[in-house]
Image: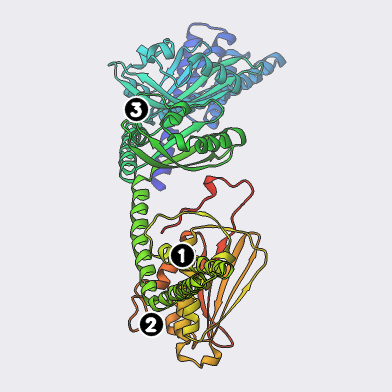
Amino acid sequence: MAAALTARFRHLGALWLFGLVALSATTWACYKFHLGFEAASLALLIVIVLLSLLDSLISSLIFSLIAVVCLDYFFVAPLFTPFVYSAEDYWALATFVGASILITTLMRRLRRTAETQHQQASLLDLTHDTIIVRDSNDVITYWNRGAEELYGWEKEEALGRVTHDLLRTISPAPLEQILREHAAVGRWEGELVHTRKDGSKVTVASRWSLEKDERGRHLRTLESNTDITERRQAEDALKRTQAAYLAEAQRLSATGSFGWNVATGDIFWSPESYRIFGLDPTIRPNLELVMQRTHPEDAARAQRAIEGVTNHRHDLDVEHRLLMPDGEIRHVHVVAHPVPEERDQFAGALMDVTARVRAQETLQRVQADFAHAARVSVLGEMTASIAHEISQPLMAISTDASATLLWLDRAEPNVGEARAHTAHIVAAAARAGQVIARVRGMAARRAPQVTLVPINGVIEDAAAFLRHELRANDVTLTLDLAPVLPPVLADVIQLQQVVVNLAMNSIQAMSRTDPAKRQLIVRSSGEPTAVTVTLDDAGPGIDRDHLGRLFDSFYTTKEDGMGMGLAICRSIIESHNGAISASNRAEGGARFAFTLPAAPILGLDAEALPEPSP
């Protein structure tokens, strides 16, 4: 601090001494050459202005007072005295002082302004960004050091040139359109591609600001450009990498993506989408191509889904088959939804689910084998019941046939009695045929046949099938069936298998209870959308430790059980979009129940059908 003050005082001392000498020398010269008051005043004023540029206003005031003394002593009568007798001379000296102070003040302000502008220009040269000022005709009037370094043109080469001619600007939109937008708004931002002096290209983030005068006329435009070439190259490389990873991920997952402008019909496909449809990527996709590849049997379904999007802007969710030119069939699942705030733009995914469908078909075949094995196993357990069911009509046929022969062998044959016994034979044969048909149906290995099934009929057929088993185990069966129920979409043999399996479990569970209490109650109930079947028995109930795993595969509580019966029941019910459960009754015994969705009779079509596993 002290050193700074000392330096300051030294500067002032030297300046004042130099100023005194300069003013004295100027006064002597003016006097020597016999110059008048006006000429001497002008000469001294020039010296004062020059001296004022070297220090503060106080120094200028001091120099002005010294100059007044010199003028008074050498050029105002009486000469060589400090006295002034004329009022005009007073005004002349006062005017000189005022003029010197005013001029030195203005000069100092201009100096500060120039220094500020120089500092600002120096700062603009320090930035790595390019700063370009161009006039209303886009002629360059300022070109900073950053512009020299980026573009290669020196300031002298760039000044006076038209910006976009010099840099050969490549813009994202027509340059005339950008210039009109800039003139209307006063600002513009965007990315431009410029050409360096050596011919190489550079990408810049450009910002334009327009300066106008008070009348709204365009004065100049300040343009600043930031070199983003490396960043843009990195972003492009990242995009290419991401696109490559995305394409590989889509290929691995067999999932393509697409964009669809519903209003114009324009469609964009990813490479995987082209692969799934078996088309060359150079072909422009459209709805006609999609429908050409769609399997004829699924064309109506696909067309309805497309119309739902085009007419109502609904989400798209449809699964259908593709028929390839070589006869290959592919299964695809297509989903799409509107892009937010873009009602006509849809983004979607196209999944090749052929492998999944084939796996499901294989699983269905395996499940069919298990279900068939389970039915055969049940039939094996019911061998005695089946034999009894068949033996009864056979015995009746034998008895009635013998009686018929006796009535016909009489001296006078009794045709009426013979006809009656023959009718009994026909009825007994029909009963035997029904038993055999039920057994064959349960034992047959066949594909599922989904039809409209009345659930009460399924229960009654199962009860007839179990009739002898119930009598053999002293179990009383009570059917409590709702009189009016909607049908279900199901395979009747599979549902019979479920009811028979659950009933057999209950019958076997009650074999260890008091015969007087052995009762099985089968109920049906429903509502417009679902049908429920409940089986209540009077057995010992289900151990709490077993409840959670009762429907697991290979889990059994029987010593000779395989653990597949209840698991297959669950598989059948769930394949029909239903649910099955087991619980203990408060009054004792177990309860098994399953619920199935009611068939939508009105407007029923093939799409509404479930795809149950066998």
Pointer 2: what residue? Answer: 557
* Residue ID at (48%, 13%): 138
User: Which residue ends up furthest to the right in the rendered image?
Assistant: 87
- Residue 509: x and y in percent read 46, 84
User: Which residue ends up furthest to the front in the rendered image?
Assistant: 411
* Residue ID at (72%, 16%): 87
Q: Relative to 326, is 130 on the left or the right? A: right
The answer to whether any part of residue 506 appears in the image is no
Q: Identify the amino acid type marked 3.
A: Pro
User: Which residue ends up furthest to the left in the rendered image?
Assistant: 198
- Residue 259: x and y in percent read 46, 34
Mark with earlier residue (2, 1): 1
* Residue ID at (45%, 79%): 505
Pointer 3: what residue? Answer: 281
The answer to whether any part of residue 166 appears in the image is yes
Pointer 1: what residue? Answer: 433
Mark with earlier residue (2, 3): 3
Name the front one of labels 2 and 3.
2
Describe the element under mark 3 as helix, strand or loop. Answer: loop
- Residue 179: x and y in percent read 53, 16
Binning the other alpha carbons within 10 Å of mark 2 as few (below 14), some (14 to 19) or many (20 upward) gives few
Describe the element under mark 1 as helix, strand or loop. Answer: helix
